[in-house]
Amino acid sequence: MITVQPTGVTPAEVVAVAREDAKVELAPATVEAMATSRAIVDKIEASGRPVYGVSTGFGALASTFIDPSRRAELQHALIRSHAAGIGAPMPREVVRAMMLLRLRSLALGHSGVRPELAQGLADLLNHDITPWVPEHGSLGASGDLAPLAHCAIVLLGEGWVLAADGRRVDAADALGDAGLKPLELAAKEGLALINGTDGMLGMLLLALDDARHLFSMADVTTALAIEAMLGSERPFLPELHAIRPHPGQAASAANIHKLLQDSRIMDSHRDDLAHAVQDAYSMRCAPQVAGAARDTLDFAAQVAGRELISVVDNPVVLPDGRVESTGNFHGEPLAFAADFLAIAAAEVGAIAERRVDRLLDVTRSRELPPFLSPDAGVNSGLMIAQYTAAGIVAENRRLAVPASADSLPTSGMQEDHVSMGWAATKKLRTVLDNLTSLLAVELLSAVRGLQLRAPLAPSPAGRAAIAAVAPFAGEPGPDIFLAPALEEARAVISRRELRAEIEAHVGKLL
């Protein structure tokens, strides 16, 4: 159970609700903070003075005064008109994260809405009702208006819900089946439900959770590939990274060095004078690339952490009774962070593909057979797996082009600069999914290389990797149908079991 306090929620709690179906409840202090804020809005509304979003229209219609008798109608009309997305539905975990984060923002007590709104969002989460949120519609300024409107309209008993089997069903039916009643909105409440960065932030937080794991797994596949290619462990000595004190680089080097210990394969060439003095950059410089990505991840996490404690709404209700317009809904901080992390993750995948190519090339793999096939010629081994990896690297390079460098004006030039943060965070998730595939190709290739070094025993990490991969990929031999093996390797990378098995032998990875 996640208890939402008036101070917000943590990244781990967002992941728990989005991915692990944790239940949500409002703390009594949250209900009190929201009620206090709402009382200020009620007082202002009764006074009759114009306040944006309370007694006026929205966007370019901000100067249009709305009669008190039509202000509830205004809020409902806002939700209906802004639920204007199009395209395939966003994943369930993204929508759940988005709803929790909007609930969190309302719970901070600066939005001037009744506690019933936050409870309504909690009810949707707790009854596993996931609004159908189309992928296109947000420009990342004025927040994620269209995606959040597709969530809000379900609270009204309208719109669509994503069924467990992927079908689109009517929200009224879903609410009825759950025993929930539609909400009637009061002044400002429709605007408060949709004016936030919650979709961008939700995707960034989920991406951070994925990237943190994948960057550690990149160190694992790097070490396995280096071991299979008879590479040197010396470039990863801690004293060599202490003299260039980038924290991510030091962490990555420490992981790789730890993973290469207790290996008969490494022992076999450690004192060989014929061994290359310097390995190729894709091996020797792995910590400099993966470490820089780790530092970029830390920056993005810092940005997300700040956003998690931010009041992202417009207008906002201040404790002294003022209602002020802000620009806090603009998604540029999140857009920059997501674009930067996408660039970093793309490079982690690019350097992994270079190691795969080296493993498969008989002229550079240090006596491994061509394409890691013991009978190359009749068999092609992993040749085309590298083609697949190369194609994914090319796609990631296209996706690494910053979305935040773009802007298109909207709302009659009232919203004349937008962040494109929704696009930035959405494509970041695609880059990370692609990185999973690239590391899967490296994992399969490195395991094949280690198997071909028999009878020399690999490191504990190598033995764990072989044990994880061999059940679906077998031993080196005649060609197999590769696609299923690659899918299974993807699952090994994305799940946490192999990492846990390796850590049981070598200690905690950074």
Image (cartoon, rainbow, N blue to C red):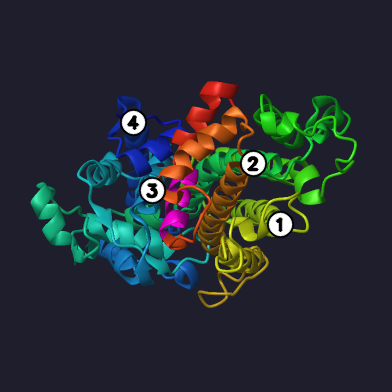
Give the CA distance from mark 2 to mark 1: 21 Å
Q: Nearer the viewer, residue 354 or 464?
A: 464
Which type of secondary structure does the marked residue at label 2 adopt?
loop
- For this view, does 12 lie left or right of residue 19? right
Q: Position of residue 28 (x, y in %)?
A: 30, 26
Give the residue pinned by disc 2: 453
Give the CA distance from mark 3 to mark 2: 77 Å
* Main SS category, magenta section: helix
Please report contact status of discs 4 and 3: CB closer than 8 Å, yes or no: no
Which type of secondary structure does the marked residue at label 4 adopt?
strand
Give the residue pinned by disc 1: 354
Q: Is residue 40 visible?
A: no
Q: Position of residue 457 (x, y in %)?
A: 61, 31
Q: Position of residue 280 (x, y in %)?
A: 82, 50
The amino acid pointed to by label 1 is: Arg
1 or 4: tag closer to the N-terminus: 4
3 or 1: tag closer to the N-terminus: 3
Specify the quadrant of the image occupied by residue 58. bottom left
The region drawn magenta spans: 484-494
